[in-house]
């Protein structure tokens, strides 16, 4: 399953709902990591988080996977003939595997869904260790069957940042009206505005009775993931990522 024997054993012994949670998180992580943006996949995530599996969506996603596979195979041939760069092929391959992860998350059988979606995701992401950390977090503190929380957690492990008028913001949190309101409230401090928009309460994703140490460990992993994403997206920018060990809040803001 490409996440290590011990973690794979935990997955296979998990409840069906927890297996579903992991398969959704893995598929979302794969799509984000591969930078695969398709309206069909957004609709598919809506199906998954609302506990709807199988059906015509799976067939449509499979067609997308096949199209992406064909593109990757063509690029592989071009690489071998010197007509394309290997990294271009690798990116195409990862996008195809991301579609495969989403397709398998839709499988009617929860055990098949989790084993195959995690396997496909492991080929779509560049950081297999982070994928394993995400799986551990889902099993560690997400309430079984809370697919929304599993999806949101994957988004925290593979964040997307954007720049708006010089402000660095979590893309999933950006709303123009809210941004304008916060900027009017704190025109003197860009870091304060960024913190207001970017901060996330990880504890809100946890189920009742979630072990604090599991949530704290996830916060540490998310903090590192955010730092990596910011360093990659905004090289040279002075940005800080912090997490509060008491409130389990992760945030990011400019240093000046």
Image: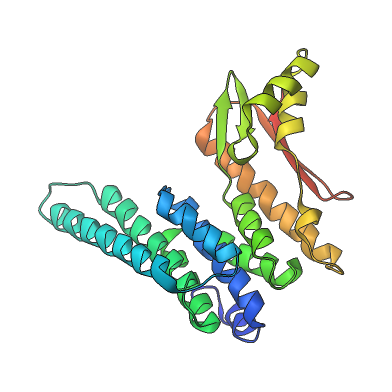
Q: At 55% across and 32% down in the image, what residue appears?
A: 162
What is the residue that sits farthest to the left in this orientation? 81
For residue 226, above or below residue 221: above
What is the residue that sits farthest to the top in this orientation? 188
Is residue 65 shown left or right of residue 158?
Answer: left
Residue 219, percent from left and from top: 74, 53
For residue 206, above or below residue 186: below
Residue 7, percent from left and from top: 62, 78
User: Looking at the image, how many numbered discs can be counted on the residues?
Assistant: 0
Q: How is the image coloured?
A: rainbow
Q: At 89% across and 50% down in the image, what residue appears?
A: 246
Front residue of 192 and 171: 171
What is the residue that sits farthest to the right in this orientation? 246
Front residue of 219 and 194: 194
Corner quadrant of residue 256: top right
For residue 62, above or below residue 160: below
Residue 44, percent from left and from top: 48, 60
Is residue 78 shown left or right of residue 69?
Answer: left
Q: At 22% across and 46% down in the image, what residue appears?
A: 85
Q: Is residue 128 visible?
A: no
Corner quadrant of residue 242: top right
Front residue of 229 and 111: 111
Q: At 75% across and 13% down in the image, what residue appears?
A: 187
Residue 112, percent from left and from top: 48, 82
Front residue of 217 and 164: 164
Q: Is residue 3 visible?
A: yes
């Amino acid at each position: 399953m490409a996440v290590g024997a011990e973690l794979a054993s935990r997955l296979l012994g998990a409840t069906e709902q927890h297996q579903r949670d992991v398969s959704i998180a893995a598929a979302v992580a794969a799509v984000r990591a591969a930078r695969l943006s398709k309206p069909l996949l957004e609709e598919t995530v809506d199906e998954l988080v609302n506990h709807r599996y199988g059906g015509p969506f799976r067939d449509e996603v499979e067609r997308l996977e096949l199209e992406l596979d064909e593109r990757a195979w063509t690029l592989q041939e071009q690489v071998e003939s010197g007509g394309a760069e290997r990294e271009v092929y690798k990116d195409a391959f990862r996008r195809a595997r991301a579609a495969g992860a989403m397709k398998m998350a839709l499988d009617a059988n929860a055990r098949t869904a989790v084993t195959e979606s995690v396997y496909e995701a492991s080929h779509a992401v560049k950081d297999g260790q982070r994928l394993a950390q995400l799986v551990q977090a889902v099993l560690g503190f997400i309430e079984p069957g809370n697919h929304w929380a599993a999806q949101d957690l994957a988004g925290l492990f593979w964040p997307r940042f954007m720049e708006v008028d010089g402000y660095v913001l979590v893309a999933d949190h950006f709303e123009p009206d809210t941004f304008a309101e916060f900027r009017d409230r704190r025109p003197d401090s860009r870091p304060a505005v960024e913190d207001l928009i970017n901060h996330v309460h990880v504890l809100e994703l946890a189920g009742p009775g979630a072990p604090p140490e599991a949530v704290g460990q996830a916060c540490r992993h998310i903090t590192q993931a955010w730092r990596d994403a910011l360093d990659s997206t905004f090289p040279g920018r002075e940005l800080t990522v912090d997490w509060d060990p008491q409130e389990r809040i992760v945030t990011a803001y400019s240093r000046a």
